[in-house]
Image (spheres, rainbow, N blue to C red):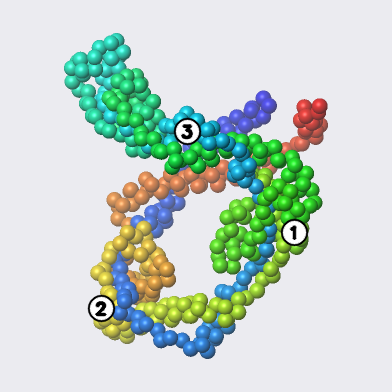
């Protein structure tokens, strides 16, 4: 171990000496600065409600043809029909027997748990000076009245307010307020966050919560009482359930313990049904992976989780298939209409570009295509909240005076013209250099360090001490021996 530490320190000293003097040349950061700092004046036009007329309703033949050309969209993966037998402490609640007198006694013992939250009036004594708040605490601890202590500390601010537990977001402060005795000051000045002043608190009055009538909460009290016994029954049945799981059909095990076998709709390997719904019993469940390795009729091992045990059976393998046209006709109709609208939008944008290239002004072409021409904007690649980020990125792929269609978010076509390209100015370059250079340096150092360490490893070959390795493993084996 000591030798390993020495070797590690030695490598550290050598690499530190090699890289402490490393300075990243401007040549490496300049391309990034120029790329980020370049600004462009761009003129955009976008579609609006008047750009696209509502497509005419398609015929059945058109829908069939569209379906035939897009069948991959209706392909369904292999799914598996699964049955599950599962139980948890919740399943044993009905087996716990409690008398009404026991439930009523529990209600009286824990009546605060079945009451509305209490309300407290508190006084908070605050100052940006911790010493002032601490002096207030010290004075009250010496028996000096709070009002007299305040007279001696004119810089202390007092705020009274009425609070309920849910109104105090800071958990520690909430617990303090609702555990303090009436009229007894807190003795530990604290800051609720970095921007807050120092504070101690005194509870001025307490209004108890209102107890809910027994009749309204009796079932909840009974359930709360039953859970501890239900957990005990759940654990008591665990060994019997494990024994029964050794080969019996799920239905027989279910009858033996009084639990129903649940039959689930076929799901894919993401636990999704053909409708796209995710089955909660199988979502993020390790059993699903095992179920996709089984043959029909086979069962999984027993899965045990946080207060839940379950076994699964693969009932049927549903092979992949393509949904027939008749079953998806309504969906085909909607997809067809969306495609027609997208095509019409793309055509309007392309027609506008062609009109500008043929000699019309940008504004004239926009009017002819029923698109909205926007005022010119000056922006960098980082864009702004007012503009579509994807459209901005597409505009930066063009050359000066180019006009083209670029795709915005969601595939919306935008027409853009590059009016001006300006390189990064000196002031902006200085700001970007301070931000970019450390990242470039870190990346360079990481690459060079890796090459350097690999060179050391190449020059100093690793020798395996097989005897030491075996002794190491044997030490674990011997420690586990009875």
Kind of element beneath mark 3 = helix
Q: Which residue is mark 2?
A: 363
Around disc 1, counting alpha carbons within 10 Å, would you say few (fewer than 14), some (14 to 19), or many (20 or more)?
Answer: some
Q: Quadrant of the C terminus?
A: top right
Q: Left or right: where does residue 38 sit relative to residue 95? A: left
Q: Earlier in the sequence, mark 2 or mark 3?
A: 3
**Visible in this render: residue 170?**
no
Q: Nearer the viewer, residue 474 or 253?
A: 253
Query: Does residue 428 sit above or below 366 in this rendering?
Result: above
Where is residue 473 shown, x and y percent of the image? Answer: 78, 33
**Tag 2 near tag 1, CB within 8 Å:** no
Residue 362 percent location from the top left of the image: 27, 78
Report the residue at 26% width, 32% height from top. 161
Upstream in sequence: badge 3 or badge 1 = 3
- Give me the disc on residue 294: 1
Left/right placement of residue 76 relative to residue 179 reads right
Disc number lying in front (2 or 3): 3
Instruction: Check disc 1 and report its element: helix, strand or loop.
Output: loop
**Residue at x-position 36% and y-position 79%:** 349
Q: Residue at x 71, y 51 (%)?
A: 254
Displayed quadrant of residue 50 = bottom left
What is the distance, in whole Å, between disc 2 and disc 1 at their CAs? Answer: 65 Å
CA–CA distance between discs 2 and 3?
77 Å
Q: Earlier in the sequence, mark 2 or mark 1?
A: 1
Residue name at image x 31 percent, y 27 percent: 206
Q: Which residue is mark 3?
A: 107
């Amino acid at each position: 171990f000591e030798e390993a530490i020495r070797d590690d320190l030695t490598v550290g000293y050598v690499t530190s000496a090699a890289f402490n003097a490393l300075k990243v040349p401007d040549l490496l950061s300049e391309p990034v600065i120029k790329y980020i700092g370049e600004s462009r004046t761009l003129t955009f036009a976008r579609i609006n409600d008047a750009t696209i007329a509502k497509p005419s309703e398609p015929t059945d033949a058109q829908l069939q043809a569209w379906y035939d050309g897009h069948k991959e969209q209706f392909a369904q993966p292999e799914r598996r029909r699964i049955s599950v037998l599962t139980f948890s402490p919740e399943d044993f609640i009905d087996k716990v027997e409690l008398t009404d007198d026991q439930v009523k006694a529990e209600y009286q013992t824990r009546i605060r748990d079945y009451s509305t939250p209490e309300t407290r009036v508190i006084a908070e004594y605050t100052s940006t000076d911790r010493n002032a708040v601490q002096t207030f605490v010290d004075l009250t601890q010496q028996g000096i009245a709070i009002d007299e202590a305040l007279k001696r500390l004119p810089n202390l601010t007092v705020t009274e307010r009425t609070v309920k537990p849910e109104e105090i977001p800071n958990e520690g402060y909430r617990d303090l307020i609702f555990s303090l005795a009436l009229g007894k000051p807190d003795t530990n000045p604290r800051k609720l966050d970095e921007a807050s002043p120092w504070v101690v608190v005194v509870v001025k009055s307490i209004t108890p919560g209102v107890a809910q009538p027994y009749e309204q909460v009796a079932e909840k009290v009974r359930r709360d009482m039953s859970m501890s016994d239900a957990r005990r029954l759940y654990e008591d049945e665990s060994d019997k359930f494990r024994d029964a799981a050794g080969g019996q059909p799920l239905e027989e095990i279910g009858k033996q313990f009084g639990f129903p076998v649940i039959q689930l709709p076929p799901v894919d390997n993401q636990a999704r049904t053909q409708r796209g719904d995710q089955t909660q019993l199988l979502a993020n469940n390790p059993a699903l992976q095992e179920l996709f390795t089984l043959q029909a009729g086979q069962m999984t091992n027993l899965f045990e989780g946080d207060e839940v045990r379950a076994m699964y059976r693969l009932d049927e393998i549903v092979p992949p298939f393509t949904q027939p046209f008749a079953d998806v006709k309504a969906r085909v109709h909607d997809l067809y209409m969306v495609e027609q609208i997208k095509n019409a939008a793309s055509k309007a944008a392309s027609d506008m570009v062609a009109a500008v290239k043929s000699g019309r002004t940008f504004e004239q072409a926009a009017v002819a295509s029923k698109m909205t021409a926007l005022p010119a904007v000056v922006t960098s690649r980082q864009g702004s909240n007012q503009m579509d980020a994807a459209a901005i990125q597409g505009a930066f792929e063009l050359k000066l005076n180019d006009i083209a269609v670029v795709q915005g978010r969601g595939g919306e076509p935008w027409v853009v013209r590059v009016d001006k390209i300006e390189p990064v100015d000196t002031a902006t370059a200085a700001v970007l250099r301070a931000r970019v250079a450390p990242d470039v340096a870190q990346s360079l150092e990481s690459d060079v360090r890796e090459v350097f360490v690999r060179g050391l490893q190449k020059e100093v070959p690793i020798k395996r001490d097989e005897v030491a390795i075996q002794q190491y493993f044997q030490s674990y084996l011997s420690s586990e021996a009875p």
